[in-house]
Amino acid sequence: MRLHGRSRLTSRVRRPVSRSRGKGFATLAIYLMDGFRSESVRIRVKGRVVYRKRSVTTNPSMGLADYAAVRVRRGTTRVEIEVSSRRLRWTLILPITRTTRLGVSVFEGGGFLVRKQHAAFVAR
């Protein structure tokens, strides 16, 4: 039996609703940019590991090593970035109200450069 051009079975199938969609959530994208040379990197957001990878290396033609994106509740968010191969750790507590992008670079002398913006990073 057909029901408005669909079989009765498919008319009852519902897609699962994602709990992370809606007005209370935003995307936090973290771009690992310049200075990464076969590094071990771990990123935590609100205490949860969202990225862990060894041998992270910057592609010099793009100025990008890798990225991680995670949906978070709007409000205050704690981000921890650890480059264990250089014994570097950086923690930032930032307000998230809409899609936010962090660009992270590391220096030879031991330090981070972090850039926060809402617009996309432009490729070189």
Image (cartoon, grey):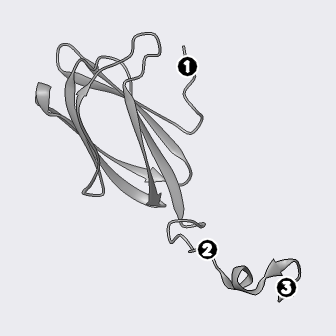
Residue at 56 percent across and 74 percent down: it is 16
Q: Nearer the viewer, residue 110 or 122?
A: 122
Q: What residue sits right under mark 2 in the picture?
A: 15
What kind of residue is marked 3? Answer: Arg
Foreground: disc 2 or disc 1 = 2
Is 12 placed left or right of 48 in the picture? Answer: right
Which residue is labeled 3 in the image? 2
Front position among marks 3 and 1: 3
Q: Secondary structure at mark 3?
A: strand
Q: Position of residue 120 (x, y in %)?
A: 58, 32
Where 116 sits versus 43, above or below? Answer: above
Tell me the amino acid under the disc marked 2. Arg
Q: Quadrant of the N terminus?
A: bottom right
Sooner in the amino-acid sequence: mark 2 or mark 3? 3
Q: What residue did someone put label 1 on?
A: 123
Kind of residue at badge 1: Ala
Give percent across and percent down for residue 61.
46, 10
Q: Are marks 3 and 1 in contact (CB under 8 Å)?
A: no
Whether residue 34 is situated above or below residue 48 in the rendered picture: above
Taking the spot 17% from the left edge, 14% from the top edge, the residue there is 109
For the residues bearing labels 2 and 3, Cβ distance under 8 angstroms: no
For residue 15, side relative to residue 75 (left or right)? right
Q: Which SS class for mark 2? A: loop
Identify the residue at image location x=89%, y=82%: 4
